[in-house]
């Protein structure tokens, strides 16, 4: 972190300052806002700009300590020649003269920080200086605090403009943090910092400083992220404790209750003796806020960090007493929501009191739904010891799996006695165990054995369907998409299929269809699955349950759009999914959606943006917070995509490292990831300059997917061969695949190969235009470049110029892209200013004589310059000038 952070945002506020200070006559601006919002930083920036504009400035700092001393804040402005016994009138008069003389011919400006604490004499002096037109002022005041009358008069009497300084927005908060750290932060960290700071620049800076000092805020790869819970560091706690101040005991007790239990209903507070009047006192002090809901009035902390400050200074004994009070209060108000069960169980644990095992199991389930695996483990272990049964064991196993403790989870589940278990309980435990064996431990054969044994032991068709869906998922990730589609379709066809089975089947079907190239069908299934999950969620929204199903099915929908030529729709789905994952604070989901945003950016040719998204996804996968068994194939996909994007920008070293990380996570059970996003190894070879090797690797990838029957993956690999310049080797197979693969891109892939193989420049121009219209700018730029080459080989110089100009315009939008096709793009022809001028006049049809008369030069000079232009542009005469000039630049 640098010594000072840059000023972020505040464009409107700075403009208001510049306008106020630049107005005719003296005056100024008053910047008002909450403590820490950034008023002082803004005022100093305004003064710095005023200095550049020709002003001379002085800085005045008011304080509570000096507020009782006459002229205490402005002592440094009072002329040193004044005697200590000079009367107030003399001070006022001589100070103005001294400031004017010191400023010479520059305009004097005063910056006044915390003007609400000016002593009366200083306030009167500053008011007089403004009224007499001797100075302008940029003052800061704290909103809601009483200021001396002369200061209040500044805006009430129109002497200065009033500007309310608001907290930073989410985007501005992220920008400021990244500027301070000197690198990007992942979305989860940015969102949590914003929620804790509420855009308060001072709080934000201290949070970040504390995170860096304690090692909680670390750099993973090229991305900063917070490991573990975000806590207020010592300096920030001190700042907030000053804000909280010495509260009356009853108000302190109220704020403590809210700090440990928010949100709390007014009725619950009244039950423990906290009347509305006490709440009003805390609200007036800016510590609490009350919000009307459909069920009553909820009381929360006015700022999240107030709770941090209180919890940091409260003794363990007092914390236990507060939690005990809360544990007694909530049941008395008739709390029935699942999140209430979680809060209630935690209060009991922290208070050292016991509660029913059923409540503990329900709370553990809610903690799992919120991805708080350590808390879920704690609750499940206590529930098990209290007689929670198989439900407690199930919750404990899931909590361990979520923390990456796969071996411990297997020991627990494998050792359970299931003689008295119901089919549903047996199926649920089998699901947890097989997922853990398959992906957590990488033992798919054992997973299959457990799955088969359970299927043979239960007769319940609903439970068997749910296990069949699990097998379909395993088939999908092993790369056998057609088999997965068949099995999922069988389950969906059953009229008595359970909601869980339908949900899982739709996910498998949607995602597997993309592998088969059935993109349109995948999109239709994705929409159906998303609607099904939303209806299902509406029915179970209060039971604390959560599943990945909606994210998974929408992810499949997003895939179908991206690979089927619906880029805008894909981007919208990825953006929505990313925002949703940030809200639920789950690294796995956030990494997945960052991956899809990266892939959408890469498709647009925005490689620099793509790398940022993919590096964020990689940092999340590498973090200690990401221990879910899905880490193996999510990480494989993330690092593979990062490797390809880095390779396509020429970052061979980064690509090599990312590919090594991807290969380290590769397993037979997730073989689909080897070619899910195309021939990644091929692009790394290309980045090393081994294009021929790259072509062979891409062909090998296509062969693997052809064997598996995955036309959707195969066609991507084959088109990469076209992009690498070997269309003749794949044109025939692409023609065979085109009728099998749905979407808007497959016909273009086939036409691209045919046109390039035939050196058909006009056909390649059409292909480039079609790719560009769909938004696939990098593909369009490559096709346009190939068109220019074909036209040049055919001797069509004018067409070559137009294609090259188009290619350069498209390539300019492909930030960071470095592919073999683009490498052949010749630079634009550069004409001198005189050559450009004469050529453009000639292109309008003017004769050499008319041009010579206009420019007052000899006709021979015009003809000689035109000859040089024809040679540079590679054209035969005037008739080709208008088209050829599109590709030129002029040199001044």
Image (cartoon, grey):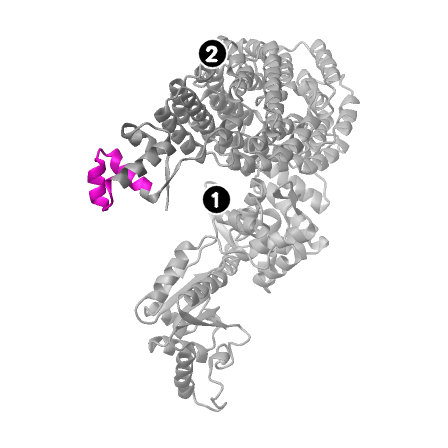
Q: Main secondary structure of the magenta part?
A: helix
The numbered disc on residue 738 is 2
- Label 1: element kind: strand
Q: Residue furthest front?
A: 860
Viewer-nearest of discs 1 and 2: 2
- Quarter of the image for residue 24 reads bottom left
Task: Give the labeled residue for mark 1.
Answer: 296
Around disc 2, counting alpha carbons within 10 Å, would you say few (fewer than 14), some (14 to 19), or many (20 or more)?
many
256 part of magenta stretch? no
Please provide percent x and percent y for residue 755: 43, 16
Q: Which mark is residue 773?
A: none
Frontmost residue, 433 versus 746: 746
Earlier-in-chain disc, 1 versus 2:
1
The magenta segment:
835-859
Residue 711 rendering spot, x and y as whole percentages = 54, 13
The answer to whether any part of residue 256 appears in the image is no
Judge left or right: residue 513 versus residue 633.
left
Residue 91, visible in the rendered structure: yes
Picture residue at 42% right of the left edge, 65% below the top:
52
């Amino acid at each position: 972190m640098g010594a000072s952070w840059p000023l972020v945002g505040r464009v409107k506020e700075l403009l208001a300052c510049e306008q106020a200070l630049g107005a005719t006559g003296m005056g100024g601006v008053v910047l008002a806002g909450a403590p820490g919002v950034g008023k002082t930083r803004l005022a100093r920036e305004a003064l710095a700009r005023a200095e550049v504009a020709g002003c001379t400035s002085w800085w005045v700092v008011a304080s509570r300590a000096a507020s009782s001393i006459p002229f205490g804040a402005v002592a440094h402005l009072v002329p040193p020649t004044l005697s200590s016994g000079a009367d107030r009138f003399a001070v006022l008069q001589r100070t103005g003269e001294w400031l004017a003389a010191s400023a010479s011919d520059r305009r004097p400006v005063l910056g006044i920080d915390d003007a609400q604490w000016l002593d009366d004499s200083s306030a009167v002096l500053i008011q007089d200086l403004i009224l007499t037109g001797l100075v302008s002022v940029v003052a800061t005041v704290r909103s809601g605090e009483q200021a001396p009358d002369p200061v209040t008069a500044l805006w009430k009497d129109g002497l200065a403009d009033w500007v309310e300084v608001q907290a930073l927005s989410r985007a501005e908060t992220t920008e400021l943090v990244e500027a301070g750290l000197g690198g990007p932060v992942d979305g989860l960290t940015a969102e949590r910092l914003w929620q804790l700071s509420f855009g308060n620049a001072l709080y934000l800076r201290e949070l970040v400083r504390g995170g860096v000092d304690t090692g909680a805020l670390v750099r993973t790869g090229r991305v900063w992220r917070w490991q573990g819970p975000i806590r207020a560091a010592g300096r920030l706690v001190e700042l907030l404790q000053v804000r909280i101040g010495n509260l009356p005991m009853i108000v302190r007790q109220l704020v403590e209750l809210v700090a440990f239990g928010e949100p709390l209903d007014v009725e619950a507070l009244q039950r423990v003796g906290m009347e509305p009047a006490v709440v009003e006192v805390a609200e007036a002090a800016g510590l609490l806020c009350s919000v009307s809901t459909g069920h009553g009035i909820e009381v929360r902390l006015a700022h999240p960090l107030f709770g941090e400050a209180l919890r940091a200074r409260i003794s363990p004994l007092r914390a236990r007493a507060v939690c005990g009070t809360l544990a007694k209060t909530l049941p008395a108000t008739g709390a029935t929501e699942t999140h209430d069960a979680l809060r209630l169980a935690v209060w009991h644990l922290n208070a050292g009191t016991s509660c029913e095992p059923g409540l503990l199991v329900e709370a553990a389930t809610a903690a799992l739904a919120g991805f708080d695996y350590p808390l879920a483990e704690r609750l499940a272990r206590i529930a098990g010891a209290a007689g929670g049964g198989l439900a407690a064991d199930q919750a404990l196993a899931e909590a361990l799996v979520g923390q990456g403790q796969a071996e411990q989870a297997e020991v627990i589940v494998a050792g359970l006695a299931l003689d008295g278990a119901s089919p549903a309980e047996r199926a649920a435990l089998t699901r947890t165990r097989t997922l853990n064996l398959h992906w957590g431990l990488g033992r798919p054969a054992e997973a299959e054995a457990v799955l088969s044994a359970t299927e043979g032991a239960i007769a319940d068709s609903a439970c068997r369907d749910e296990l069949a869906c699990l097998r379909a998922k395993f088939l999908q990730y092993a790369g056998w998409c057609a088999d997965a589609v068949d099995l999922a379709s069988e389950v969906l066809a059953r009229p008595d299929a359970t909601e869980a089975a339908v949900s899982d089947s739709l996910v498998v079907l949607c995602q597997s269809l993309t592998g088969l190239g059935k993109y349109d069908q995948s999109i239709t299934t994705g929409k159906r699955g998303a609607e099904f999950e939303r209806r299902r969620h509406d029915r179970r929204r209060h039971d604390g349950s959560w599943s990945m199903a909606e994210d998974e099915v929408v992810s499949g929908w997003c895939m179908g759009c991206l690979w089927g030529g619906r880029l805008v729709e894909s981007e919208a789905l990825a953006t929505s999914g990313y925002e949703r994952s940030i809200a639920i604070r789950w690294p796995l989901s956030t990494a997945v959606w960052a991956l899809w945003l990266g892939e959408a950016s890469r498709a647009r040719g925005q490689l620099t943006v793509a790398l940022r998204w993919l590096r964020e996804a990689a940092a999340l996968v590498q973090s200690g917070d990401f221990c879910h068994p899905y880490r193996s194939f999510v990480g494989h996909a993330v690092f593979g995509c990062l490797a390809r994007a880095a390779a396509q920008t020429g970052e061979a070293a980064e690509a090599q490292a990312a590919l090594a990380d991807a290969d380290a996570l590769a397993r037979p059970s997730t073989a689909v990831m080897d070619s899910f996003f195309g021939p990644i190894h091929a692009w790394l070879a290309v980045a090393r300059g081994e294009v021929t090797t790259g072509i062979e690797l891409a062909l090998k990838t296509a062969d693997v997917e052809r064997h598996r029957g995955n036309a959707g993956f195969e066609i991507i690999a084959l088109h990469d061969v076209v992009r690498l310049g070997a269309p003749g080797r794949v044109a025939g197979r692409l023609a065979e695949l085109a009728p099998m693969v749905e979407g808007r891109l497959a016909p273009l892939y086939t036409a691209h190969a045919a046109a390039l193989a035939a050196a058909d420049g006009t056909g390649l121009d059409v292909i480039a235009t079609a790719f560009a219209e769909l938004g696939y700018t990098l593909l369009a730029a490559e096709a346009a470049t190939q068109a220019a080459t074909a036209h040049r080989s055919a001797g069509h110089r004018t067409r070559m110029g137009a294609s090259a100009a188009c290619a350069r315009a498209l390539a300019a939008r492909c930030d960071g892209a470095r592919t073999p096709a683009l490498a052949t793009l010749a630079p634009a022809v550069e004409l001198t200013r005189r050559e450009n001028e004469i050529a453009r006049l000639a292109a309008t049809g003017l004769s050499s004589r008319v041009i010579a008369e206009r420019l007052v030069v000899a006709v021979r000079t015009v003809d000689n310059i035109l000859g040089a232009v024809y040679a540079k542009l590679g054209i035969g005469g005037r008739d080709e000038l208008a088209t050829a000039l599109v590709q030129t630049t002029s040199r001044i």
